[in-house]
């Protein structure tokens, strides 16, 4: 039997109650790739990437995400449908079952860390049932050097047992799968789901509590990159709005594609060591950097391959949420270490399926706070023909499912930091133009890129308001011209060819904004409330 151990170090998991006699510690990505294939849990695509199916779950399951209610969390967490409390004793009982389950299995252990800034470094041990989940941890977390591993003391532990099924009646879960954070024990316990995103978002959620509460640092669900002049840009947005796509820019160094912290020392740092890109409809023409990152070491999830191992990126028969994870060094132009200075520009990305929000507009500080708290994007009702009604989706701070504290806490920190740093904030609609979903079409990626480049190059006259039109409904400042973008695209109303229909749809959306904002009004100043849309339908 070959020894797979890359390092001579062997470890015991006795302290966790895991008695497995087959502990694979810190295997190399090549080893994990090969073992996955040997075990029949994955295949090699023609690109060299490993292709796996994550099983029953191909996305996160927010209703099965819990936080143990204990002395640390009870008075701090914003409890509700998003942060669902879990009983500490129930956690212990379930934990014991999971470790007993893993004790008769071969397990894969990886020591890694989160937070590229050494002052914020969080050591993480990930214990996986499956080799490919451990490869995901290699790709997504930061990789310690061999010297660092010598003296590695894990602080947080992720225990990931996709094959373990909970019994809701006994275990206190909603159904057989769960992702539970325990801040006293510093454990993320994940079972019943093989979706790898639960691993990264588990640690993200922990950091979204730890950093503001204990380190006075703002965590953000955003991507970030830096230009040749050292100018940082930050892109907030909900899933599918373009954080990964737009931050991966050959002319700017990538800091990270999803999770960052903004410190009081005027820096922005990545939490992670890799990217997790959507691959639906991916093409080399539109997104060459991401396309080329799919090679040996990367993991493709839930894609369809032909006999030669070529991926059909259009095939959504398993899920629309097809993904690839890769270590950040698969992208050529990266910032090393993954730290930038205070952002100069912040973009709020929204995929507006109503097709009424301007493709790019500048926000005042009040509008920026209002839109951050609202966290608007849209979901398209379905992919079947004839379904034309988009559904507005609001997620505070552009990432409510990962934010254990009240959104006002993050919003207040962001507002203060934006004002202090004198950041420019832009609202970018990467969604529909020329009509709503079903009538219009998705904004062309090359136009969105041109608009962002124009901002970053200083081509959109920042201070001259004659160059802008104030949108009569949203109140935002819409540029009249933009290099590389047809002028007709800049005004959403003009793209519709039917003013009345446009305004009707715009009011439908502003009413949804108003309805959603009600729950935050009590926490917000008059200043922030004024940042909302200017007109509503009565
Ligand atoms: P997540 O939080 O789930 O990682 P994300 O914000 O990183 O989501 P992306 O992975 O960048 O989102 O997904 C954006 C998707 O939309 C990509 O598939 C991209 O090709 C597509 N797209 C189409 N048009 C545009 C556009 N104008 N701007 C940005 N993305 C676009
Ligand atoms: Mn992303």
Image: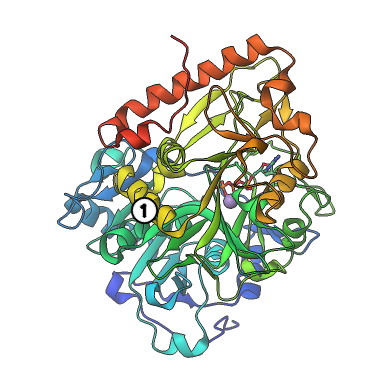
Quarter of the figure with the C terminus: top left
> Hey, which quadrant is residue 92 in on the image?
bottom left
Q: Secondary structure at mark 1?
A: helix
Tell me which residue sits at (36%, 80%) in the image.
Answer: 12
Tell me which residue sits at (38%, 76%) in the image.
Answer: 119
Residue 259 position within the rendered picture, expressed as x and y whole percent measured from the top left: 49, 57
> Hey, which quadrant is residue 516 in on the image?
top left
399 with respect to 318 (left or right): left
Numbered marks: total: 1
Residue 118 position within the rendered picture, expressed as x and y whole percent measured from the top left: 42, 78
Up/down of 18 relative to 172, above or below: below
Any atom of ligand 1 within 8 Å of the CB at mark 1?
no
360 with respect to 57 (left or right): right
- Decide if residue 9 is in sight here: no
Q: In this view of the protein, which residue sits in the foreground, 304 or 513? A: 513
Quarter of the figure with the N terminus: bottom right
Residue under label 1, please give it.
416
Up/down of 121 relative to 62, above or below: below
């Amino acid at each position: 039997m070959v020894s797979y151990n890359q390092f001579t170090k062997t470890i015991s998991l006795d302290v966790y109650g895991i008695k497995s006699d087959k502990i694979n510690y810190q295997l190399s990505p090549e080893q994990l790739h090969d073992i996955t294939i040997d075990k029949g849990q994955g295949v090699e695509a023609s690109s060299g990437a490993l292709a796996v199916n994550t099983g029953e779950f191909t996305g996160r399951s927010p209703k099965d995400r819990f936080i143990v209610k204990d002395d640390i969390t009870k008075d701090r967490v914003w409890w509700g449908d998003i942060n669902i409390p879990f009983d500490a004793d129930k956690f212990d009982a379930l934990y014991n079952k999971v470790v007993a389950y893993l004790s008769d299995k071969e397990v894969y252990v990886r020591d890694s860390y989160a937070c590229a800034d050494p002052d914020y470094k969080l050591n993480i041990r990930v214990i996986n049932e499956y080799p490919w989940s451990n490869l995901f941890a290699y790709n997504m977390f930061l990789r310690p050097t061999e010297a660092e591993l010598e003296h590695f003391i894990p602080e947080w532990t992720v225990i990931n047992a996709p094959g373990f099924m909970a019994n809701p009646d006994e275990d206190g879960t909603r159904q057989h799968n769960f992702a539970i954070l325990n801040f006293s024990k510093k454990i993320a316990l994940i079972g019943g789901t093989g979706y790898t995103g639960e691993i990264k978002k588990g640690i993200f959620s922990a950091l979204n509590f730890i950093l503001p509460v204990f380190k006075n640092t703002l965590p953000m669900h955003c991507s970030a990159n830096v230009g040749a002049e050292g100018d940082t840009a930050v892109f907030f947005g909900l899933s599918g709005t373009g954080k990964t796509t737009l931050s991966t820019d050959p002319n700017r160094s990538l800091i990270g594609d999803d999770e960052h912290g903004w410190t009081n020392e005027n820096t922005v740092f990545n939490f992670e060591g890799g990217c997790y890109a959507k691959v639906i409809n991916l093409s080399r023409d539109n997104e060459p950097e991401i396309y080329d990152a799919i090679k040996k070491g990367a993991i493709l999830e839930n894609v369809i391959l032909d006999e030669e191992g070529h991926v059909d990126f259009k095939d959504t028969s398993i899920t629309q949420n097809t993904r690839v994870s890769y270590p950040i060094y698969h992208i050529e132009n990266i910032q090393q270490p993954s730290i930038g200075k205070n952002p100069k520009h912040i973009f709020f990305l929204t995929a507006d399926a109503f097709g009424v929000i301007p493709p790019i507009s500048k926000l005042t500080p009040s509008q920026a706070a209002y839109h951050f708290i609202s966290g608007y994007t849209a979901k398209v009702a379905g992919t079947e023909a004839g379904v034309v009604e988009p559904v507005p989706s609001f997620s505070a701070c552009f990432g409510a499912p990962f934010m254990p504290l009240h959104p006002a806490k993050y919003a207040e920190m962001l507002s203060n930091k934006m004002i202090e740093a004198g950041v420019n904030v832009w609202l970018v609609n990467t969604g529909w133009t020329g009509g709503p979903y079903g009538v219009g079409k998705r904004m062309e990626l090359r136009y969105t890129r041109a608009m962002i480049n124009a901002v970053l190059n200083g081509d959109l006259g920042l201070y001259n308001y004659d160059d802008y039109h104030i949108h009569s409904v949203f109140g935002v400042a819409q540029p009249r011209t933009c290099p590389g973008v047809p002028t007709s695209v800049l005004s959403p109303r003009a793209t519709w060819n039917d003013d009345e229909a446009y305004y009707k749809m715009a009011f439908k959306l502003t009413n949804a904004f108003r309805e959603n904002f009600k729950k935050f009004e009590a926490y917000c100043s008059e200043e922030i409330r004024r940042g909302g849309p200017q007109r509503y339908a009565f």
